[in-house]
Image (tube, helix red, strand yellow):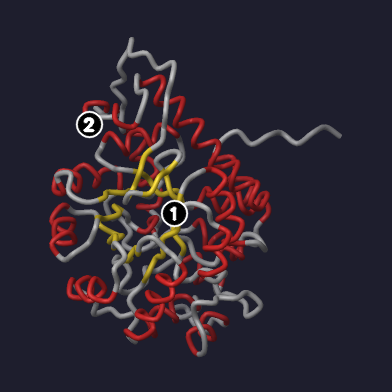
Amino acid sequence: MGEPTPLLNLLEYEAAAAARLPRMAFDYFAGGAGDEVTLRATRAAWDDIQLRYRVLRDVSQRSLATTVLGQPLAFPALVAPMAFQRLAHADGELATARAASEAGIGMILSTLATTAIEDVREAMRGPLWFQLYIYRDRGMSRALVERAERAGCGALVLTVDSPILGRRERDVRNAFHVPAAFPVPNLTGTPRTTLAGAASGAETASALASFVAEFWDASISWRDVEWLRSITTLPILVKGIVRGDDARLALEHGAAGVVVSNHGGRQLDTAVSTARALPEVADAMGGRGTLLVDGGIRRGTDVLKALACGADAVLVGRPVLWGLAVDGAAGARRVLDLLRDECDLAFGLAGCASVADVTRDFVA
Protein backbone atom coordinates (compact mmCIF):
# COMPACT_ATOMS: atom_id res chain seq x y z
CA MET A 1 0.00 0.00 0.00
CA GLY A 2 1.51 3.32 -1.09
CA GLU A 3 1.99 6.53 0.84
CA PRO A 4 -1.11 8.74 1.15
CA THR A 5 -1.34 11.48 -1.44
CA PRO A 6 -0.11 14.76 0.09
CA LEU A 7 -2.63 17.55 0.50
CA LEU A 8 -1.55 20.41 -1.72
CA ASN A 9 -3.81 23.30 -0.78
CA LEU A 10 -6.30 24.56 1.77
CA LEU A 11 -9.34 23.34 -0.18
CA GLU A 12 -8.01 19.77 -0.13
CA TYR A 13 -7.69 20.01 3.65
CA GLU A 14 -11.40 20.81 3.86
CA ALA A 15 -12.29 17.65 1.94
CA ALA A 16 -9.97 15.60 4.14
CA ALA A 17 -11.48 17.05 7.31
CA ALA A 18 -15.00 16.28 6.09
CA ALA A 19 -14.03 12.62 5.88
CA ARG A 20 -12.73 12.60 9.47
CA LEU A 21 -15.08 14.76 11.52
CA PRO A 22 -18.47 13.73 12.90
CA ARG A 23 -21.26 15.28 10.86
CA MET A 24 -22.42 17.58 13.68
CA ALA A 25 -18.94 19.05 14.16
CA PHE A 26 -18.13 19.41 10.46
CA ASP A 27 -21.45 21.05 9.66
CA TYR A 28 -21.06 23.45 12.59
CA PHE A 29 -17.65 24.56 11.36
CA ALA A 30 -18.42 24.53 7.63
CA GLY A 31 -21.98 25.78 7.52
CA GLY A 32 -23.55 29.17 6.98
CA ALA A 33 -26.89 30.86 7.50
CA GLY A 34 -30.02 30.39 5.42
CA ASP A 35 -29.34 29.18 1.90
CA GLU A 36 -25.60 29.80 2.45
CA VAL A 37 -25.54 32.35 -0.36
CA THR A 38 -23.10 34.59 1.51
CA LEU A 39 -20.96 31.61 2.46
CA ARG A 40 -20.44 30.77 -1.21
CA ALA A 41 -20.23 34.34 -2.46
CA THR A 42 -17.60 35.35 0.08
CA ARG A 43 -15.20 32.78 -1.32
CA ALA A 44 -16.10 33.48 -4.96
CA ALA A 45 -15.60 37.25 -4.58
CA TRP A 46 -11.85 36.85 -4.11
CA ASP A 47 -11.69 34.82 -7.32
CA ASP A 48 -13.52 37.60 -9.17
CA ILE A 49 -10.76 40.13 -8.43
CA GLN A 50 -8.08 40.24 -11.12
CA LEU A 51 -4.47 41.15 -10.39
CA ARG A 52 -2.61 43.78 -12.43
CA TYR A 53 0.91 42.54 -11.77
CA ARG A 54 4.14 44.46 -12.36
CA VAL A 55 7.22 43.11 -14.16
CA LEU A 56 10.98 43.70 -14.01
CA ARG A 57 10.91 44.69 -10.33
CA ASP A 58 13.71 42.48 -8.87
CA VAL A 59 11.94 40.06 -6.59
CA SER A 60 15.00 37.90 -5.94
CA GLN A 61 14.78 38.81 -2.25
CA ARG A 62 11.31 38.98 -0.68
CA SER A 63 9.93 39.59 2.79
CA LEU A 64 6.34 39.06 3.90
CA ALA A 65 7.00 40.43 7.39
CA THR A 66 4.73 43.15 8.73
CA THR A 67 3.37 44.56 11.97
CA VAL A 68 -0.21 44.92 13.17
CA LEU A 69 -0.98 47.03 16.25
CA GLY A 70 2.79 47.23 16.64
CA GLN A 71 3.12 43.44 16.91
CA PRO A 72 5.32 41.58 14.39
CA LEU A 73 3.97 38.93 12.03
CA ALA A 74 6.05 36.71 9.74
CA PHE A 75 3.43 37.20 7.05
CA PRO A 76 0.25 39.32 7.07
CA ALA A 77 -2.15 36.88 8.72
CA LEU A 78 -3.64 35.91 12.06
CA VAL A 79 -5.79 32.95 13.02
CA ALA A 80 -9.42 34.08 13.24
CA PRO A 81 -11.44 33.52 16.42
CA MET A 82 -13.24 30.18 16.18
CA ALA A 83 -15.28 28.51 18.91
CA PHE A 84 -15.19 24.97 20.27
CA GLN A 85 -11.94 23.84 18.63
CA ARG A 86 -11.76 20.62 20.64
CA LEU A 87 -14.66 19.42 18.51
CA ALA A 88 -12.08 19.32 15.70
CA HIS A 89 -9.19 17.78 17.67
CA ALA A 90 -8.54 16.82 21.29
CA ASP A 91 -5.77 19.44 21.60
CA GLY A 92 -8.04 22.21 20.32
CA GLU A 93 -6.85 25.76 20.82
CA LEU A 94 -3.52 24.64 22.30
CA ALA A 95 -2.64 22.96 19.00
CA THR A 96 -3.74 26.03 17.07
CA ALA A 97 -1.61 28.25 19.30
CA ARG A 98 1.43 26.06 18.70
CA ALA A 99 0.83 26.12 14.94
CA ALA A 100 0.42 29.90 14.85
CA SER A 101 3.52 30.36 17.02
CA GLU A 102 5.64 28.15 14.77
CA ALA A 103 4.35 29.99 11.70
CA GLY A 104 5.27 33.33 13.26
CA ILE A 105 1.79 34.82 13.21
CA GLY A 106 -0.88 35.80 15.72
CA MET A 107 -4.06 34.20 17.01
CA ILE A 108 -7.41 35.54 18.20
CA LEU A 109 -8.96 33.38 20.91
CA SER A 110 -12.73 32.95 20.92
CA THR A 111 -14.84 33.70 23.97
CA LEU A 112 -16.33 30.25 23.35
CA ALA A 113 -12.97 28.49 23.34
CA THR A 114 -12.61 25.00 24.75
CA THR A 115 -9.29 25.96 26.39
CA ALA A 116 -8.65 28.53 29.10
CA ILE A 117 -7.22 31.91 28.12
CA GLU A 118 -4.27 31.44 30.45
CA ASP A 119 -3.31 28.06 28.96
CA VAL A 120 -3.45 29.38 25.40
CA ARG A 121 -1.36 32.39 26.35
CA GLU A 122 1.26 30.07 27.82
CA ALA A 123 1.36 28.03 24.59
CA MET A 124 1.41 31.07 22.30
CA ARG A 125 4.69 32.77 21.48
CA GLY A 126 3.26 35.40 19.14
CA PRO A 127 0.47 37.96 19.48
CA LEU A 128 -2.64 36.64 21.24
CA TRP A 129 -5.82 38.71 21.17
CA PHE A 130 -9.14 37.93 22.81
CA GLN A 131 -12.49 37.99 21.01
CA LEU A 132 -15.44 39.24 23.03
CA TYR A 133 -19.23 39.25 22.86
CA ILE A 134 -21.33 41.57 25.00
CA TYR A 135 -23.50 39.65 27.45
CA ARG A 136 -26.72 40.90 29.02
CA ASP A 137 -24.84 40.61 32.29
CA ARG A 138 -22.13 43.22 31.74
CA GLY A 139 -20.32 41.77 34.72
CA MET A 140 -19.64 38.61 32.70
CA SER A 141 -18.12 40.65 29.89
CA ARG A 142 -16.10 42.79 32.28
CA ALA A 143 -14.72 39.70 34.02
CA LEU A 144 -13.58 38.26 30.68
CA VAL A 145 -11.88 41.53 29.76
CA GLU A 146 -10.04 41.64 33.07
CA ARG A 147 -9.04 38.01 32.71
CA ALA A 148 -7.72 38.59 29.17
CA GLU A 149 -5.69 41.56 30.42
CA ARG A 150 -4.19 39.55 33.28
CA ALA A 151 -3.31 36.72 30.93
CA GLY A 152 -1.35 39.08 28.69
CA CYS A 153 -3.59 39.35 25.64
CA GLY A 154 -2.54 42.21 23.39
CA ALA A 155 -5.92 43.39 22.10
CA LEU A 156 -9.66 42.85 22.30
CA VAL A 157 -11.73 41.96 19.23
CA LEU A 158 -15.36 42.91 19.80
CA THR A 159 -17.73 40.97 17.55
CA VAL A 160 -20.74 43.16 16.73
CA ASP A 161 -22.57 41.34 13.93
CA SER A 162 -24.34 38.87 16.24
CA PRO A 163 -26.87 40.67 18.44
CA ILE A 164 -28.99 37.63 17.62
CA LEU A 165 -27.89 34.41 15.97
CA GLY A 166 -28.35 33.75 12.29
CA ARG A 167 -30.44 30.69 11.43
CA ARG A 168 -27.98 27.92 10.64
CA GLU A 169 -30.08 25.09 9.30
CA ARG A 170 -27.31 22.52 9.45
CA ASP A 171 -27.07 23.08 13.21
CA VAL A 172 -30.83 22.81 13.62
CA ARG A 173 -30.91 19.58 11.63
CA ASN A 174 -28.04 18.10 13.63
CA ALA A 175 -29.30 19.36 17.02
CA PHE A 176 -25.92 21.02 17.53
CA HIS A 177 -24.62 21.09 21.09
CA VAL A 178 -21.32 20.99 22.94
CA PRO A 179 -21.22 17.77 24.97
CA ALA A 180 -20.59 18.25 28.68
CA ALA A 181 -17.32 16.32 28.32
CA PHE A 182 -15.83 19.25 26.39
CA PRO A 183 -14.72 22.17 28.57
CA VAL A 184 -15.84 25.71 27.78
CA PRO A 185 -13.78 27.36 30.52
CA ASN A 186 -14.96 30.93 29.90
CA LEU A 187 -18.49 29.83 30.83
CA THR A 188 -19.81 28.39 34.08
CA GLY A 189 -23.20 27.55 35.52
CA THR A 190 -26.33 28.02 33.44
CA PRO A 191 -24.60 29.28 30.27
CA ARG A 192 -22.48 26.15 30.03
CA THR A 193 -25.45 23.91 30.75
CA THR A 194 -27.45 25.57 27.99
CA LEU A 195 -24.73 24.77 25.45
CA ALA A 196 -24.55 21.14 26.51
CA GLY A 197 -27.98 19.94 25.50
CA ALA A 198 -30.12 20.89 22.52
CA ALA A 199 -33.82 21.38 23.10
CA SER A 200 -36.45 19.79 20.91
CA GLY A 201 -38.34 21.61 18.17
CA ALA A 202 -37.40 23.13 14.84
CA GLU A 203 -36.70 26.59 16.27
CA THR A 204 -34.66 25.56 19.31
CA ALA A 205 -32.85 22.41 18.25
CA SER A 206 -29.49 24.21 18.17
CA ALA A 207 -28.11 24.62 21.68
CA LEU A 208 -25.99 27.52 20.45
CA ALA A 209 -29.11 29.34 19.27
CA SER A 210 -30.70 28.82 22.69
CA PHE A 211 -27.54 30.04 24.41
CA VAL A 212 -27.32 33.22 22.33
CA ALA A 213 -31.00 34.03 22.78
CA GLU A 214 -30.69 33.71 26.54
CA PHE A 215 -27.35 35.35 27.28
CA TRP A 216 -26.21 37.71 24.51
CA ASP A 217 -27.50 41.27 24.50
CA ALA A 218 -29.48 42.28 21.40
CA SER A 219 -29.54 45.88 22.64
CA ILE A 220 -25.80 46.46 22.09
CA SER A 221 -24.98 49.80 20.48
CA TRP A 222 -22.07 52.15 19.91
CA ARG A 223 -22.37 53.08 23.59
CA ASP A 224 -21.01 49.64 24.40
CA VAL A 225 -17.85 50.30 22.42
CA GLU A 226 -17.35 53.39 24.58
CA TRP A 227 -18.10 51.36 27.72
CA LEU A 228 -15.55 48.75 26.72
CA ARG A 229 -13.02 51.48 26.01
CA SER A 230 -13.63 52.84 29.53
CA ILE A 231 -12.82 49.57 31.32
CA THR A 232 -9.65 48.50 29.48
CA THR A 233 -6.34 49.88 28.30
CA LEU A 234 -6.14 47.27 25.53
CA PRO A 235 -6.71 48.37 21.93
CA ILE A 236 -10.15 47.37 20.63
CA LEU A 237 -10.92 46.14 17.14
CA VAL A 238 -14.57 46.06 16.05
CA LYS A 239 -15.28 42.89 14.07
CA GLY A 240 -18.25 42.55 11.74
CA ILE A 241 -18.01 45.78 9.73
CA VAL A 242 -19.04 45.83 6.04
CA ARG A 243 -19.82 49.55 5.55
CA GLY A 244 -17.65 52.64 5.41
CA ASP A 245 -19.94 54.69 7.65
CA ASP A 246 -19.83 52.01 10.36
CA ALA A 247 -16.03 51.92 10.12
CA ARG A 248 -15.88 55.67 10.73
CA LEU A 249 -18.24 55.33 13.68
CA ALA A 250 -16.04 52.61 15.17
CA LEU A 251 -13.04 54.93 15.08
CA GLU A 252 -15.08 57.84 16.45
CA HIS A 253 -16.16 55.69 19.41
CA GLY A 254 -12.61 54.77 20.37
CA ALA A 255 -11.79 51.63 18.40
CA ALA A 256 -8.21 51.11 17.27
CA GLY A 257 -9.46 49.56 14.04
CA VAL A 258 -11.97 47.23 12.46
CA VAL A 259 -12.28 43.77 10.97
CA VAL A 260 -14.26 43.61 7.74
CA SER A 261 -16.27 40.43 8.31
CA ASN A 262 -19.67 38.89 7.64
CA HIS A 263 -19.08 36.21 10.27
CA GLY A 264 -18.12 33.63 7.68
CA GLY A 265 -21.56 33.82 6.09
CA ARG A 266 -23.12 32.56 9.32
CA GLN A 267 -25.31 35.53 10.24
CA LEU A 268 -27.23 37.55 7.61
CA ASP A 269 -27.54 35.52 4.44
CA THR A 270 -27.12 37.46 1.16
CA ALA A 271 -24.94 39.98 3.04
CA VAL A 272 -22.16 41.59 1.03
CA SER A 273 -18.97 39.59 0.60
CA THR A 274 -15.96 40.90 2.47
CA ALA A 275 -13.83 41.28 -0.68
CA ARG A 276 -16.47 43.66 -2.07
CA ALA A 277 -16.92 45.54 1.21
CA LEU A 278 -13.21 46.03 1.91
CA PRO A 279 -12.39 48.88 -0.53
CA GLU A 280 -15.28 51.04 0.74
CA VAL A 281 -14.19 50.51 4.34
CA ALA A 282 -10.56 51.27 3.48
CA ASP A 283 -11.55 54.50 1.74
CA ALA A 284 -13.70 55.55 4.70
CA MET A 285 -10.89 54.93 7.18
CA GLY A 286 -8.35 56.77 5.06
CA GLY A 287 -5.36 55.13 6.71
CA ARG A 288 -6.62 55.76 10.25
CA GLY A 289 -6.52 52.69 12.48
CA THR A 290 -5.89 49.04 11.79
CA LEU A 291 -7.87 47.32 9.04
CA LEU A 292 -8.20 43.53 8.88
CA VAL A 293 -10.43 41.31 6.76
CA ASP A 294 -11.66 37.71 6.97
CA GLY A 295 -13.95 35.42 5.03
CA GLY A 296 -13.03 33.02 2.26
CA ILE A 297 -9.24 33.45 2.38
CA ARG A 298 -7.98 30.24 0.78
CA ARG A 299 -5.06 31.21 -1.48
CA GLY A 300 -1.96 33.35 -1.29
CA THR A 301 -3.39 35.48 -4.07
CA ASP A 302 -6.34 36.25 -1.76
CA VAL A 303 -3.91 37.70 0.78
CA LEU A 304 -2.27 39.85 -1.89
CA LYS A 305 -5.67 41.09 -3.08
CA ALA A 306 -6.74 41.90 0.47
CA LEU A 307 -3.65 44.00 1.05
CA ALA A 308 -4.10 45.73 -2.31
CA CYS A 309 -7.68 46.61 -1.31
CA GLY A 310 -6.46 48.28 1.88
CA ALA A 311 -6.16 45.60 4.57
CA ASP A 312 -3.16 45.46 6.88
CA ALA A 313 -3.53 41.68 7.24
CA VAL A 314 -6.07 38.88 6.89
CA LEU A 315 -7.69 36.50 9.34
CA VAL A 316 -7.67 32.80 8.41
CA GLY A 317 -10.43 30.72 9.90
CA ARG A 318 -11.91 27.43 8.73
CA PRO A 319 -8.77 26.13 6.93
CA VAL A 320 -6.92 26.09 10.25
CA LEU A 321 -9.69 23.92 11.70
CA TRP A 322 -9.43 21.55 8.74
CA GLY A 323 -5.71 21.18 9.33
CA LEU A 324 -6.39 20.64 13.02
CA ALA A 325 -8.90 17.90 12.25
CA VAL A 326 -6.53 16.13 9.86
CA ASP A 327 -3.36 16.18 11.96
CA GLY A 328 -3.60 18.32 15.07
CA ALA A 329 -0.98 21.04 15.49
CA ALA A 330 1.07 19.65 12.59
CA GLY A 331 -1.93 19.84 10.28
CA ALA A 332 -2.77 23.39 11.31
CA ARG A 333 0.87 24.38 10.83
CA ARG A 334 0.90 22.78 7.38
CA VAL A 335 -2.16 24.82 6.38
CA LEU A 336 -0.47 28.03 7.50
CA ASP A 337 2.76 27.08 5.74
CA LEU A 338 0.88 26.40 2.51
CA LEU A 339 -0.78 29.80 2.71
CA ARG A 340 2.50 31.55 3.49
CA ASP A 341 4.29 29.83 0.59
CA GLU A 342 1.47 30.70 -1.80
CA CYS A 343 1.59 34.28 -0.54
CA ASP A 344 5.33 34.46 -1.18
CA LEU A 345 4.80 33.10 -4.69
CA ALA A 346 2.02 35.59 -5.39
CA PHE A 347 4.19 38.48 -4.18
CA GLY A 348 7.07 37.42 -6.41
CA LEU A 349 4.96 36.92 -9.52
CA ALA A 350 3.15 40.24 -8.96
CA GLY A 351 6.42 42.17 -8.68
CA CYS A 352 6.31 42.82 -4.92
CA ALA A 353 9.40 42.39 -2.77
CA SER A 354 7.64 43.45 0.44
CA VAL A 355 4.27 44.30 1.93
CA ALA A 356 5.03 47.97 1.34
CA ASP A 357 5.09 47.33 -2.42
CA VAL A 358 1.42 46.26 -2.49
CA THR A 359 -0.76 49.16 -3.62
CA ARG A 360 -4.38 49.62 -4.71
CA ASP A 361 -3.49 49.66 -8.42
CA PHE A 362 -2.67 45.93 -8.25
CA VAL A 363 -6.37 45.09 -8.42
CA ALA A 364 -8.54 45.62 -11.45
For label 2, the SS is helix
Quarter of the C terminus within the rendering: top left
Percent from the top left, x then y, of residue 344? 45, 28
Residue type, numbered disc 2: Arg
Percent from the top left, x then y, of residue 3? 79, 34
Between residue 333 and residue 235, name the one nearer to us: 235
Percent from the top left, x then y, of residue 167? 39, 69
Residue on which the image places disc 1:
127
Q: What residue do we see at 65% from left, 60% from top? A: 89
Sequence-first disc among 2 and 1: 1
Judged left or right of residue 308, residue 345 is: right
For label 1, the SS is loop
Residue on which the image places disc 2:
360
Residue located farthest toward the top when viewing the structure as drawn: 56
| Residue 200 visible at all | no
| Residue 63 visible at all | yes
Query: Would you call the spot at circle 2 few (<14 residues within 10 Å), some (14-19), or many (20 or more)?
Result: some
Q: What residue do we see at 57% from left, 67% from top? A: 119
